[in-house]
Image (cartoon, rainbow, N blue to C red):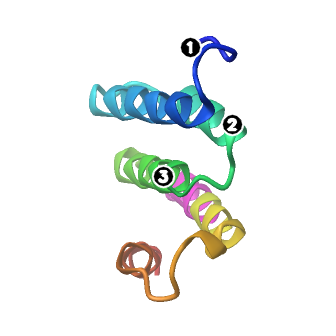
Amino acid sequence: LNKGEVPTPIRIDALLYIALSKQQLGQNDEQELGEAYELNPYNKATVVYMTMSLLERIKRTKAFEDKTVLVHQIEKLLDQHDSLFPRYDPWLIKVKQFLG
């Protein structure tokens, strides 16, 4: 995706779809999510996808210490982007309940 040829919102969406496809294939999606985040760190869809990717990694991780690190990453991400979500956003409430 050449930067000058494709509008940023479309690039972000494409990167998120690639990341989703990779995640569903069991592949690493961090590069695409990182690129989407760099393009616009305040894109709600990117924050949601990043959170869901981290939750999926928690599900696959066996070591407690690794899970704890991932939980802290999610908490930090959501704290930094709290303003993107309505106060009683059902998705956000469920994620926070899951994290405990």
| 24 in the magenta segment | no
Residue positioned 42% across, 53% down in the render: 52
Mark 3 — residue? 45
Mark 1 — residue? 1
Question: x%, y% of residue 86?
Answer: 51, 81
The amino acid on which the numbered mark 1 sits, given as a three-letter code, is Leu
Q: Residues within 10 Å of mark 1 (few under 14, many from 20)?
A: few
Q: Which comes sooner in the sequence, label 2 or label 3?
A: 2
Predominant SS of the magenta segment: helix
Q: Residues within 10 Å of mark 2 (few under 14, many from 20)?
A: some
Check the image and report above or below for 68 versus 23: below
Question: x%, y% of residue 41?
Answer: 69, 49
Residue positioned 42% across, 81% down in the render: 93
The amino acid on which the numbered mark 2 sits, given as a three-letter code, is Leu
Q: Is residue 37 left or right of residue 10?
A: right
The amino acid on which the numbered mark 3 sits, given as a three-letter code, is Ala
Furthest toward the left, the residue is 24
Q: Are marks 3 and 1 in contact (CB under 8 Å)?
A: no
Q: Is residue 19 left or right of residue 87?
A: left
Q: Residues within 10 Å of mark 3 (few under 14, many from 20)?
A: some
Q: Regarding mark 1 in the picture, which secondary structure is present there?
A: loop
Q: Could you say which is closer to the camera, residue 51 or residue 13?
A: 13
Q: Regarding mark 2 in the picture, which secondary structure is present there?
A: helix
**Count of labels shown?**
3
Mark 2 — residue? 39
Check the image and report above or below for 62 versus 26: below
Magenta residues, start to end: 64-72
Residue positioned 59% across, 69% down in the render: 84
Furthest toward the bottom, the residue is 88
